[in-house]
Protein backbone atom coordinates (compact mmCIF):
# COMPACT_ATOMS: atom_id res chain seq x y z
CA UNK A 1 0.00 0.00 0.00
CA UNK A 2 1.47 3.38 -0.96
CA UNK A 3 1.50 6.44 1.30
CA UNK A 4 -1.57 8.03 -0.30
CA UNK A 5 -3.66 4.88 0.13
CA UNK A 6 -2.50 4.62 3.75
CA UNK A 7 -3.41 8.29 4.26
CA UNK A 8 -6.94 7.77 2.99
CA UNK A 9 -7.32 4.69 5.16
CA UNK A 10 -6.15 6.63 8.23
CA UNK A 11 -8.50 9.53 7.50
CA UNK A 12 -11.44 7.15 7.26
CA UNK A 13 -10.84 6.31 10.92
CA UNK A 14 -9.40 9.62 12.14
CA UNK A 15 -10.73 12.36 9.86
CA UNK A 16 -9.46 15.92 9.76
CA UNK A 17 -10.78 18.51 12.17
CA UNK A 18 -10.07 21.70 10.23
CA UNK A 19 -9.82 24.79 12.41
CA UNK A 20 -10.80 27.46 9.93
CA UNK A 21 -12.80 27.71 6.69
CA UNK A 22 -14.23 30.99 5.36
CA UNK A 23 -16.99 29.49 3.20
CA UNK A 24 -19.72 31.63 4.89
CA UNK A 25 -17.94 34.87 3.92
CA UNK A 26 -17.32 33.60 0.37
CA UNK A 27 -21.05 32.88 0.07
CA UNK A 28 -21.82 36.40 1.27
CA UNK A 29 -19.38 38.04 -1.13
CA UNK A 30 -20.11 35.93 -4.19
CA UNK A 31 -23.87 35.36 -4.12
CA UNK A 32 -25.32 37.28 -1.16
CA UNK A 33 -26.00 33.98 0.65
CA UNK A 34 -28.07 32.57 -2.23
CA UNK A 35 -27.32 28.90 -1.65
CA UNK A 36 -29.05 27.87 -4.86
CA UNK A 37 -26.41 29.86 -6.73
CA UNK A 38 -23.61 28.04 -4.87
CA UNK A 39 -24.98 24.59 -4.13
CA UNK A 40 -22.23 22.93 -2.13
CA UNK A 41 -23.84 19.51 -2.67
CA UNK A 42 -22.29 19.74 -6.15
CA UNK A 43 -18.74 20.40 -7.32
CA UNK A 44 -17.92 24.12 -7.03
CA UNK A 45 -14.39 23.92 -8.43
CA UNK A 46 -13.36 27.26 -9.90
CA UNK A 47 -15.83 29.10 -7.68
CA UNK A 48 -15.09 27.87 -4.15
CA UNK A 49 -12.43 25.82 -2.42
CA UNK A 50 -15.14 23.97 -0.51
CA UNK A 51 -18.07 21.72 -1.32
CA UNK A 52 -19.40 18.49 0.15
CA UNK A 53 -17.94 16.11 -2.47
CA UNK A 54 -14.46 17.57 -1.95
CA UNK A 55 -14.83 17.61 1.85
CA UNK A 56 -15.63 13.91 1.62
CA UNK A 57 -12.70 13.27 -0.73
CA UNK A 58 -10.43 15.17 1.66
CA UNK A 59 -11.37 13.08 4.67
CA UNK A 60 -12.78 16.02 6.63
CA UNK A 61 -14.74 14.89 9.68
CA UNK A 62 -15.22 18.20 11.46
CA UNK A 63 -15.10 21.79 10.30
CA UNK A 64 -14.98 25.04 12.24
CA UNK A 65 -16.82 27.38 9.90
CA UNK A 66 -15.53 30.92 10.34
CA UNK A 67 -18.27 33.49 10.95
CA UNK A 68 -15.85 36.25 10.01
CA UNK A 69 -16.72 39.88 9.27
CA UNK A 70 -14.34 42.54 7.95
CA UNK A 71 -12.68 44.84 10.46
CA UNK A 72 -14.01 47.95 8.75
CA UNK A 73 -17.36 46.79 10.11
CA UNK A 74 -17.62 48.10 13.65
CA UNK A 75 -20.17 48.37 16.42
CA UNK A 76 -23.67 47.12 15.70
CA UNK A 77 -22.85 46.62 12.01
CA UNK A 78 -20.21 44.03 12.95
CA UNK A 79 -22.59 42.26 15.31
CA UNK A 80 -25.35 42.13 12.68
CA UNK A 81 -23.00 40.83 10.01
CA UNK A 82 -21.76 38.13 12.39
CA UNK A 83 -25.36 37.07 13.02
CA UNK A 84 -25.89 36.83 9.26
CA UNK A 85 -22.84 34.57 9.03
CA UNK A 86 -24.22 32.36 11.79
CA UNK A 87 -27.53 32.26 9.95
CA UNK A 88 -26.00 30.99 6.72
CA UNK A 89 -24.20 28.20 8.58
CA UNK A 90 -27.57 27.18 10.04
CA UNK A 91 -29.03 27.23 6.53
CA UNK A 92 -26.24 25.02 5.22
CA UNK A 93 -26.90 22.51 7.99
CA UNK A 94 -30.64 22.53 7.28
CA UNK A 95 -30.06 21.95 3.55
CA UNK A 96 -27.55 19.12 3.96
CA UNK A 97 -28.49 17.11 7.07
CA UNK A 98 -27.28 13.84 5.56
CA UNK A 99 -23.74 15.25 5.36
CA UNK A 100 -23.43 18.00 7.99
CA UNK A 101 -24.24 17.76 11.70
CA UNK A 102 -24.41 20.71 14.06
CA UNK A 103 -21.82 20.26 16.82
CA UNK A 104 -21.71 22.21 20.07
CA UNK A 105 -19.41 19.95 22.07
CA UNK A 106 -16.67 17.35 21.85
CA UNK A 107 -19.31 14.65 22.34
CA UNK A 108 -21.22 16.05 19.35
CA UNK A 109 -18.06 15.79 17.26
CA UNK A 110 -17.69 12.13 18.18
CA UNK A 111 -21.38 11.48 17.43
CA UNK A 112 -21.01 13.05 14.00
CA UNK A 113 -18.02 10.85 13.25
CA UNK A 114 -19.93 7.75 14.35
CA UNK A 115 -22.80 8.76 12.04
CA UNK A 116 -20.51 9.41 9.09
CA UNK A 117 -21.40 13.10 9.02
CA UNK A 118 -19.17 16.19 9.14
CA UNK A 119 -19.35 17.88 12.54
CA UNK A 120 -20.01 21.58 11.94
CA UNK A 121 -18.86 24.08 14.52
CA UNK A 122 -18.41 27.85 14.30
CA UNK A 123 -15.66 30.28 15.18
CA UNK A 124 -15.99 34.08 15.26
CA UNK A 125 -12.94 35.69 13.66
CA UNK A 126 -12.20 38.94 15.42
CA UNK A 127 -13.16 40.49 18.75
CA UNK A 128 -14.81 43.40 16.92
CA UNK A 129 -17.74 40.99 16.48
CA UNK A 130 -18.77 41.44 20.14
CA UNK A 131 -18.70 45.28 20.10
CA UNK A 132 -16.97 45.42 23.52
CA UNK A 133 -19.86 43.55 25.15
CA UNK A 134 -19.54 40.43 27.29
CA UNK A 135 -23.30 39.94 26.92
CA UNK A 136 -22.85 39.78 23.15
CA UNK A 137 -20.01 37.29 23.65
CA UNK A 138 -22.35 35.06 25.65
CA UNK A 139 -25.03 35.49 23.00
CA UNK A 140 -22.67 34.21 20.30
CA UNK A 141 -21.86 31.21 22.44
CA UNK A 142 -25.57 30.42 22.87
CA UNK A 143 -25.93 30.56 19.08
CA UNK A 144 -23.23 27.92 18.71
CA UNK A 145 -19.96 29.83 18.35
CA UNK A 146 -17.24 27.73 20.00
CA UNK A 147 -14.16 29.89 19.52
CA UNK A 148 -13.42 33.55 19.06
CA UNK A 149 -10.25 34.88 17.46
CA UNK A 150 -9.39 37.85 19.70
CA UNK A 151 -8.47 40.10 16.75
CA UNK A 152 -8.40 39.97 12.99
CA UNK A 153 -5.94 42.08 10.97
CA UNK A 154 -6.57 45.27 12.98
CA UNK A 155 -6.39 46.02 16.68
CA UNK A 156 -9.57 45.98 18.72
CA UNK A 157 -10.09 48.31 21.67
CA UNK A 158 -8.81 45.69 24.09
CA UNK A 159 -6.23 43.62 22.15
CA UNK A 160 -3.35 44.16 19.73
CA UNK A 161 -3.31 42.44 16.35
CA UNK A 162 -0.25 40.89 14.72
CA UNK A 163 -0.62 43.09 11.64
CA UNK A 164 -1.43 46.48 13.15
CA UNK A 165 0.71 49.01 15.03
CA UNK A 166 0.97 48.05 18.73
CA UNK A 167 -1.27 50.17 20.93
CA UNK A 168 -1.74 48.28 24.19
CA UNK A 169 1.28 45.99 24.34
CA UNK A 170 -1.01 42.94 24.42
CA UNK A 171 -4.34 42.71 26.26
CA UNK A 172 -5.97 45.50 28.25
CA UNK A 173 -7.72 44.87 31.57
CA UNK A 174 -10.98 44.39 29.67
CA UNK A 175 -9.22 42.08 27.23
CA UNK A 176 -8.14 39.86 30.09
CA UNK A 177 -11.72 39.88 31.34
CA UNK A 178 -12.89 38.75 27.88
CA UNK A 179 -10.49 35.80 28.12
CA UNK A 180 -11.71 34.92 31.62
CA UNK A 181 -15.34 35.05 30.49
CA UNK A 182 -14.57 32.87 27.49
CA UNK A 183 -13.06 30.36 29.92
CA UNK A 184 -16.20 30.52 32.07
CA UNK A 185 -18.62 29.82 29.24
CA UNK A 186 -16.45 27.23 27.47
CA UNK A 187 -15.56 29.24 24.35
CA UNK A 188 -12.07 28.52 23.05
CA UNK A 189 -9.66 31.48 23.01
CA UNK A 190 -8.22 31.63 19.49
CA UNK A 191 -4.86 33.39 19.20
CA UNK A 192 -4.43 33.38 15.42
CA UNK A 193 -4.09 36.94 14.09
CA UNK A 194 -3.05 38.42 17.46
CA UNK A 195 0.28 40.06 18.31
CA UNK A 196 2.86 37.94 20.12
CA UNK A 197 2.37 40.16 23.18
CA UNK A 198 -1.36 39.38 23.08
CA UNK A 199 -0.59 35.66 22.75
CA UNK A 200 1.56 35.79 25.88
CA UNK A 201 -0.96 37.86 27.86
CA UNK A 202 -3.76 35.47 26.90
CA UNK A 203 -1.70 32.43 27.91
CA UNK A 204 -0.94 34.08 31.25
CA UNK A 205 -4.64 34.81 31.79
CA UNK A 206 -6.40 31.71 30.46
CA UNK A 207 -7.06 28.76 32.74
CA UNK A 208 -8.35 26.75 29.77
CA UNK A 209 -6.43 25.48 26.73
CA UNK A 210 -6.19 27.97 23.87
CA UNK A 211 -6.03 27.34 20.14
CA UNK A 212 -4.46 28.88 17.08
CA UNK A 213 -7.13 28.09 14.49
CA UNK A 214 -4.92 28.89 11.47
CA UNK A 215 -1.29 29.84 12.17
CA UNK A 216 2.06 28.26 11.38
CA UNK A 217 5.61 28.45 12.77
CA UNK A 218 7.44 31.79 12.84
CA UNK A 219 10.85 30.08 12.97
CA UNK A 220 10.12 28.48 9.60
CA UNK A 221 8.57 31.59 8.01
CA UNK A 222 9.17 34.89 9.80
CA UNK A 223 5.72 36.44 9.43
CA UNK A 224 3.89 38.16 12.32
CA UNK A 225 0.83 35.94 11.70
CA UNK A 226 2.85 32.93 12.79
CA UNK A 227 3.65 31.59 16.26
CA UNK A 228 7.01 32.23 17.97
CA UNK A 229 8.76 29.22 19.46
CA UNK A 230 8.35 30.36 23.07
CA UNK A 231 4.58 30.48 22.55
CA UNK A 232 4.55 27.10 20.82
CA UNK A 233 6.47 25.70 23.77
CA UNK A 234 4.02 27.23 26.24
CA UNK A 235 1.21 25.15 24.72
CA UNK A 236 2.62 22.09 26.50
CA UNK A 237 1.69 23.52 29.91
CA UNK A 238 -1.47 25.23 28.68
CA UNK A 239 -2.81 22.16 26.87
CA UNK A 240 -3.66 24.10 23.75
CA UNK A 241 -3.43 23.27 20.04
CA UNK A 242 -1.75 25.16 17.19
CA UNK A 243 -3.38 24.42 13.84
CA UNK A 244 -1.05 24.94 10.88
CA UNK A 245 -2.41 27.06 8.06
CA UNK A 246 -1.82 26.75 4.31
CA UNK A 247 -1.75 30.46 3.27
CA UNK A 248 1.41 30.80 1.12
CA UNK A 249 2.49 34.21 2.42
CA UNK A 250 2.44 32.80 5.97
CA UNK A 251 4.35 29.61 5.17
CA UNK A 252 6.79 30.45 2.35
CA UNK A 253 9.20 33.37 2.92
CA UNK A 254 9.51 34.13 -0.80
CA UNK A 255 5.74 34.52 -1.10
CA UNK A 256 5.59 37.50 1.26
CA UNK A 257 7.02 40.21 -1.02
CA UNK A 258 5.09 38.88 -4.02
CA UNK A 259 1.83 39.01 -2.03
CA UNK A 260 2.44 42.63 -1.01
CA UNK A 261 2.73 43.54 -4.69
CA UNK A 262 -0.37 41.49 -5.58
CA UNK A 263 -2.34 43.19 -2.79
CA UNK A 264 -1.24 46.60 -4.04
CA UNK A 265 -2.40 45.64 -7.55
CA UNK A 266 -5.81 44.70 -6.14
CA UNK A 267 -6.20 48.08 -4.45
CA UNK A 268 -5.17 49.84 -7.65
CA UNK A 269 -8.09 48.05 -9.32
CA UNK A 270 -10.47 49.30 -6.62
CA UNK A 271 -10.74 45.89 -4.92
CA UNK A 272 -10.15 44.74 -1.36
CA UNK A 273 -6.97 42.67 -1.17
CA UNK A 274 -8.85 39.79 0.51
CA UNK A 275 -11.54 39.68 -2.18
CA UNK A 276 -11.90 36.21 -3.73
CA UNK A 277 -14.91 36.84 -5.98
CA UNK A 278 -14.56 35.71 -9.62
CA UNK A 279 -13.90 39.32 -10.70
CA UNK A 280 -11.13 39.67 -8.13
CA UNK A 281 -9.61 36.31 -9.04
CA UNK A 282 -9.36 37.42 -12.68
CA UNK A 283 -7.34 40.44 -11.52
CA UNK A 284 -5.14 38.13 -9.44
CA UNK A 285 -4.67 35.73 -12.35
CA UNK A 286 -3.68 38.54 -14.74
CA UNK A 287 -1.11 39.77 -12.22
CA UNK A 288 0.24 36.25 -11.70
CA UNK A 289 0.59 35.76 -15.46
CA UNK A 290 2.76 38.85 -15.64
CA UNK A 291 4.65 38.21 -12.41
CA UNK A 292 4.80 34.49 -11.56
CA UNK A 293 4.38 33.84 -7.86
CA UNK A 294 6.57 31.69 -5.64
CA UNK A 295 4.65 28.47 -5.08
CA UNK A 296 4.33 26.70 -1.74
CA UNK A 297 3.85 22.93 -1.79
CA UNK A 298 2.62 20.14 0.44
CA UNK A 299 6.23 19.79 1.63
CA UNK A 300 6.20 23.44 2.77
CA UNK A 301 3.31 22.72 5.14
CA UNK A 302 4.95 19.51 6.31
CA UNK A 303 8.07 21.52 7.20
CA UNK A 304 5.96 23.71 9.48
CA UNK A 305 4.29 20.72 11.08
CA UNK A 306 7.65 19.02 11.66
CA UNK A 307 8.85 22.12 13.52
CA UNK A 308 5.62 22.60 15.44
CA UNK A 309 5.69 18.97 16.57
CA UNK A 310 9.30 19.33 17.74
CA UNK A 311 8.63 22.49 19.76
CA UNK A 312 5.04 22.13 20.99
CA UNK A 313 4.78 18.35 21.07
CA UNK A 314 2.56 15.97 19.14
CA UNK A 315 -0.39 16.55 21.52
CA UNK A 316 -0.55 20.25 20.67
CA UNK A 317 -0.78 20.54 16.89
CA UNK A 318 -3.55 20.40 14.31
CA UNK A 319 -4.64 21.73 10.90
CA UNK A 320 -6.45 24.93 9.91
CA UNK A 321 -6.30 25.40 6.17
CA UNK A 322 -8.07 28.80 5.74
CA UNK A 323 -9.88 27.60 2.62
CA UNK A 324 -12.12 30.18 0.93
CA UNK A 325 -10.31 32.85 2.94
CA UNK A 326 -7.27 33.22 0.68
CA UNK A 327 -6.75 33.66 -3.03
CA UNK A 328 -3.75 31.32 -3.29
CA UNK A 329 -2.91 27.91 -1.85
CA UNK A 330 0.00 25.47 -2.00
CA UNK A 331 0.40 23.11 -4.93
CA UNK A 332 -1.34 19.88 -3.95
CA UNK A 333 -3.57 21.61 -1.41
CA UNK A 334 -5.63 23.73 -3.80
CA UNK A 335 -8.94 22.82 -2.14
CA UNK A 336 -10.39 20.80 0.73
CA UNK A 337 -9.83 17.51 -1.10
CA UNK A 338 -6.06 17.83 -0.58
CA UNK A 339 -5.63 16.65 3.01
CA UNK A 340 -4.71 13.05 2.06
CA UNK A 341 -1.69 14.39 0.17
CA UNK A 342 -0.48 16.19 3.31
CA UNK A 343 -0.96 13.08 5.43
CA UNK A 344 0.87 11.01 2.79
CA UNK A 345 3.79 13.45 2.93
CA UNK A 346 3.97 13.13 6.71
CA UNK A 347 3.82 9.34 6.46
CA UNK A 348 6.74 9.49 4.04
CA UNK A 349 8.63 11.53 6.65
CA UNK A 350 8.13 8.82 9.23
CA UNK A 351 5.19 10.14 11.23
CA UNK A 352 3.40 7.27 12.97
CA UNK A 353 -0.28 6.60 12.44
CA UNK A 354 -0.84 7.31 16.16
CA UNK A 355 0.77 10.73 15.80
CA UNK A 356 -1.25 11.47 12.67
CA UNK A 357 -4.50 10.51 14.41
CA UNK A 358 -3.66 13.12 17.06
CA UNK A 359 -2.89 15.73 14.39
CA UNK A 360 -6.09 15.15 12.43
CA UNK A 361 -8.73 14.34 15.04
CA UNK A 362 -7.80 13.63 18.63
CA UNK A 363 -6.04 16.86 19.61
CA UNK A 364 -8.84 19.15 18.44
CA UNK A 365 -11.55 17.07 20.09
CA UNK A 366 -9.53 16.89 23.31
CA UNK A 367 -8.92 20.66 23.49
CA UNK A 368 -12.64 21.39 23.22
CA UNK A 369 -13.44 18.74 25.81
CA UNK A 370 -10.84 20.19 28.20
CA UNK A 371 -12.25 23.71 27.75
CA UNK A 372 -15.71 22.37 28.56
CA UNK A 373 -14.39 20.81 31.78
CA UNK A 374 -12.70 24.06 32.83
CA UNK A 375 -15.93 25.95 32.18
CA UNK A 376 -17.98 23.55 34.32
CA UNK A 377 -15.55 24.04 37.19
CA UNK A 378 -15.49 27.85 36.91
CA UNK A 379 -19.29 28.06 36.83
CA UNK A 380 -19.48 26.34 40.23
CA UNK A 381 -17.59 29.32 41.66
CA UNK A 382 -18.83 32.39 39.82
CA UNK A 383 -21.51 33.68 37.54
CA UNK A 384 -21.41 35.87 34.43
CA UNK A 385 -19.15 38.91 34.33
CA UNK A 386 -20.89 42.22 33.76
CA UNK A 387 -17.69 44.22 33.52
CA UNK A 388 -17.52 46.97 30.90
CA UNK A 389 -14.62 48.35 28.94
CA UNK A 390 -15.33 51.88 30.17
CA UNK A 391 -14.98 50.80 33.81
CA UNK A 392 -11.90 48.59 33.34
CA UNK A 393 -10.00 50.54 30.66
CA UNK A 394 -11.60 53.99 30.66
CA UNK A 395 -13.85 55.48 27.96
CA UNK A 396 -13.14 54.21 24.44
CA UNK A 397 -11.73 56.95 22.22
Image (cartoon, helix red, strand yellow):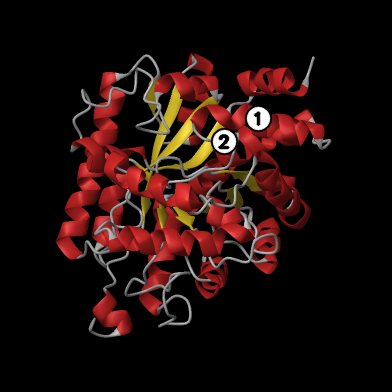
Q: Quick check: 305 left or right of 24?
A: right
Residue most toward the right? 350
Residue 76: percent from the left, percent from the top?
Answer: 15, 60
> Which of the 4 image quadrants contains residue 353?
top right
Which quadrant is home to the C terminus?
bottom left
Judging by the rendered image, the residue that carries numbered circle 1 is 341
Whether 118 is drawn above or below 137: the answer is above
The number of discs equals 2
Q: Mark 2 or mark 1: which comes first in sequence?
A: 2
Whether 390 is drawn above or below 330: the answer is below
Residue 166: percent from the left, percent from the top?
Answer: 44, 81
Most foreground residue, 46 or 377: 46
Most foreground residue, 257 or 25: 257
> Which of the 4 image quadrants contains residue 210?
bottom right
Whole-number angstrom distance, CA of label 2 to CA of label 1: 8 Å
> Which of the 4 image quadrants contains residue 312?
bottom right
Q: Is residue 193 visible?
A: no
Q: Residue at x 42, y 82 (%)?
A: 168
Judging by the rendered image, the residue that carries numbered circle 2 is 333
Q: Is residue 80 visible?
A: yes
Residue 351: percent from the left, percent from the top?
Answer: 80, 36
- Circle 2/circle 1 CB separation < 8 Å: yes
SS type, badge 1: helix
Residue 91: percent from the left, percent from the top?
Answer: 24, 28
Crowding around mark 1 (Cα neighbors within 10 Å: few <14, some 14 to 19, many 20+) is: many
Most foreground residue, 245 or 202: 245
Q: Quick check: 258 left or right of 50?
A: right
Amino acid sequence: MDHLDRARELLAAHPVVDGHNDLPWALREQVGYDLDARDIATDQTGLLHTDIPRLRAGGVGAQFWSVYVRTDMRGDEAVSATLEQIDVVAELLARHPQHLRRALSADDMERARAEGRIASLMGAEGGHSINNSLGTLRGLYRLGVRYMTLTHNDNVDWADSATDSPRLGGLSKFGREVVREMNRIGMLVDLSHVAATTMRDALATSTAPVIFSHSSARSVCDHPRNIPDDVLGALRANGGVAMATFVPKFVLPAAGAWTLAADRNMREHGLHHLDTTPQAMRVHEDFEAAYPRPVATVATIADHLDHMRAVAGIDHIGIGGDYDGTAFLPRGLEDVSGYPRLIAELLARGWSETDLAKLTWRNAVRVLRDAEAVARDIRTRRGPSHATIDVLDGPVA
